[in-house]
Amino acid sequence: MRRAFCLGVAVAAMAIAWGAASGCGSSNPNSGFPGAAGDGGSGSSSGGGSTSDAPGSFTGDGGPTFPDGGAPSQDGGTGTPISIVYAQSADTLYRMDPTSKQVAVVGAFSGGCSSVIDIAIDSNSNGYVTTSSNLWKVDLTTAACTMISTGSYPNSLSFVPKGTLDPNAEALVGYNGSEYIRIDTTTGKVTSIGTIGGGYSSSGDIVSVIGGGTFLTVKGGKESCNDCLLQIDPKTGALVQSYGSVAHADVFGLAFWAGTAYGFDNGGQVFSIGWQNGQLVTQNIPVPNPPPGLSFWGAGSTTSAPPTSADGGGIPIQ
């Protein structure tokens, strides 16, 4: 998630719907970026595994069509999770189909939430966002916010599965620097749980999946990361293992689907993070004709996302 001290650049992070963000591009918040697709956003190559380009595409209305036009967690009652992740800028919510790489703008945040710094989504596709001073519930179909509480909230946010910190429910967690915290979704109360260790600090964003791993983008550590991907223990917040560099800096948004992580960075770039030949492999997802100043401040995906690809592959966990 985007750091709280950054100025509000109008661009939504998460569902990678690269429609024009309010104040930063096209005046129509429900359209895709105008013009033909270019290479849009090749990632930086500062260390780590290999980097290549993967195609991104736009439908005529800016994104994919979902069964009810919104954000269902299951496909037609079959029990199969809908292939969708979210991203956001300071003022706009986006969605992306991680299978087709099609993207769409959900809409500008409304209801009073502005300068949104991260998003988290539970197993039932209930969305929550934070600003530096408030916790909000967000409607993933409209981007309308409802305030829950006032307080100081982190720049990284995710749910962790039931049984991790609470035997009966999922828990909303985040990082303030290196400190791992839990946030009560009813009262907004923040409780300290632990620290990362290893000299790392959240960059950053956290994402967790049922039956899979919990991942965090970080700076620091023995590798002097800028940024690296870690697996962390969701019960304590402590380091489990470092995968090394993701070849992008300031990765404020992180989502996950079917064994692959998706990064959204402060420079407006989107990329997948996979595993090949014993190392991370980063593939850029071009953003055609992005508006000036595009900056992703956060991203998120449901905890019920598939933990591995269809063939059982994915980022290895301990």
Image (cartoon, grey):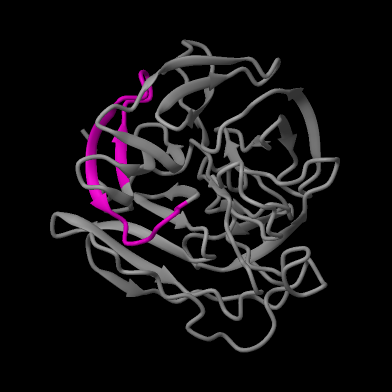
Using the image, determine if residue 224 lies above or below residue 36: above
33 left or right of 148? left
61 left or right of 212? right
Q: Residue at x 20, y 41 (%)?
A: 222
Residue 245 painted magenta: yes
| Quarter where residue 180 is shown | top left
Query: Quarter holding the C terminus?
Result: top left
Q: Position of residue 158 (x, y in %)?
A: 51, 34
Q: Position of residue 159 (x, y in %)?
A: 52, 30
What range of the chain is rendered magenta?
Answer: 229-251
Using the image, determine if residue 189 lies above or below residue 201: above
| Quarter where residue 136 is shown | top right
Q: Residue at x 47, y 48 (%)?
A: 255
| Quarter where residue 236 is shown | top left
Residue nearest the viewer, comparing 291 with 141? 291
Residue reaching furthest to the top: 167
Q: Position of residue 218 (x, y in %)?
A: 36, 43
Q: Residue at x 57, y 57 (%)?
A: 296
Q: Position of residue 95 (x, y in %)?
A: 62, 57
